[in-house]
Amino acid sequence: MTLAGGGGLVSAVPLPTGTRRLAIVERARPYPLAVAGPGDFIFRDEGEVDPEIVMRQPGFSLYCVDPSTRTALFVQTPDSVELARAPFYYQAQHANALAAVAVPFAVLPRLAQVAIVDPTRLILLYSVGRCGSTLVASALTSLGGVTALSEPDVFTQLVGLRGTMSDSQLSELVRLCVRIVCGTAAPGRTVALKFRSFVVEISDLIHLNFPSARRVFLYRHVVDWSRSSVQAFTGYDPSASQSLRPIQDRLGRMVPLMNAYRAAKGRLLTPVEMLACQWVSQVDRALSLRRPLHAVRYEDLVTDPDRAVGELFAFCGLPEPVGLEAVLANDSQAGTTLAQAAVRDRPVHLDEAELNRAVAELWGELLAARHFAGAAR
């Protein structure tokens, strides 16, 4: 977390103990799709405040955690900003934040206890990305009477924390964050959390804490998904233009299979091998999700959206959607760097033979590892 002091900007200054109200001096993000983090703002400390303000006062939402100071960062946005209708929750939080409050981890259980959450009315949307998940979140909000939050990024952050603390500690942080995010967004109502694709990597911890939640997984054929990903994300991270190492190091924390594959190869992976790792890892995680699980193919969303969305609504205990045509007519990511108009003309260069080879190799290694583990028991 960065604070502004009398002598200028001071980086990584530990906050005094207690819950602090923070004025936003400046916004600072490396690029629009970067995972939310405490360095996204420069703050001025305005003193101690009652932590329950973030639960009682409208407009507060959990933005991220700061493991270095063991605090959770809440931002306050204007009443006019509907985060549940934003294409990307974390981007709307960052762009519209008026102020922030930093709450010590030790206080979070108290806030989670205040949060009014019905776990039976929780919908968890996992996906591989680039497969219609933002559209589904929009349909749930517009037609299902659901408060659907599209990518609250604190959960993406938690994926990267796995391995830096025990699973029991991370599991408790997951439980607290889910309760607080849902409790501040729509107390007692049906809430859908549409995650970034990486969050399926901690789905086991989410399900451990919320076994009654409805689980949905959206996916797409690997070749079409890779083409769409290349088109959407090429050039999104400026560091990738110099070297694959920074982005591969970072993605390796989100996709453990990528680190393992890189170690096995003894070199940096190619961009195509990185795509293969991400798709295989996330599909494999989905296959291990506890049942019941409702799977939705992107291809079915395209060819028969009424049936695909209708079946998803029925699985989630929602009435049949009426007016889907209007939702489909709009670009659910309009106004963002991933809007259809922004990506449709970008060239795509993909070696399908390399992709299929890497996917087959990765699946083979996963199955072999499971077979070995099973035989050893």
Image: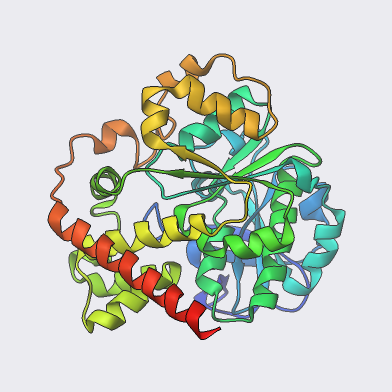
Q: In the rendered view, does 278 fall on the left or right side of 345?
A: right
Tell me residue 112's x, y (percent). 80, 59
Task: Find the residue positioned furthest to the front.
Answer: 375
Q: Residue at x 28, y 64 (%)?
A: 274
Using the rendered image of the protein, determine whether residue 216 is visible from the camera's viewpoint: yes
Visual colour scheme: rainbow
Using the rendered image of the protein, determine whether residue 101 is visible from the camera's viewpoint: no
Q: In the rendered view, does 91 fall on the left or right side of 173?
A: left
Tell me residue 207's x, y (percent). 67, 58
For the N terminus, the quadrant is bottom right
Q: Nearer the viewer, residue 51 or 13?
A: 51
Q: Nearer the viewer, residue 118 or 75?
A: 118
Tell me residue 271's x, y (percent). 21, 63
Q: Which quadrant holds residue 269? A: bottom left
Q: How many numbered tags mark residues here?
A: 0
Q: Residue at x 76, y 54 (%)?
A: 54
Q: Nearer the viewer, residue 334 or 354?
A: 354
Q: Nearer the viewer, residue 109 or 284?
A: 284
Tell me residue 143's x, y (percent). 61, 22
Q: In the rendered view, does 115 fall on the left or right side of 348?
A: right
Above or below, 218 against 242 in this view is: above
For the C terminus, the quadrant is bottom right
Above or below, 182 against 31 in this view is: above
Q: Which quadrant holds residue 192? A: top right
Above or below, 162 against 282 in this view is: below
Q: Residue at x 80, y 51 (%)?
A: 55
Above or below, 88 against 2 in this view is: above
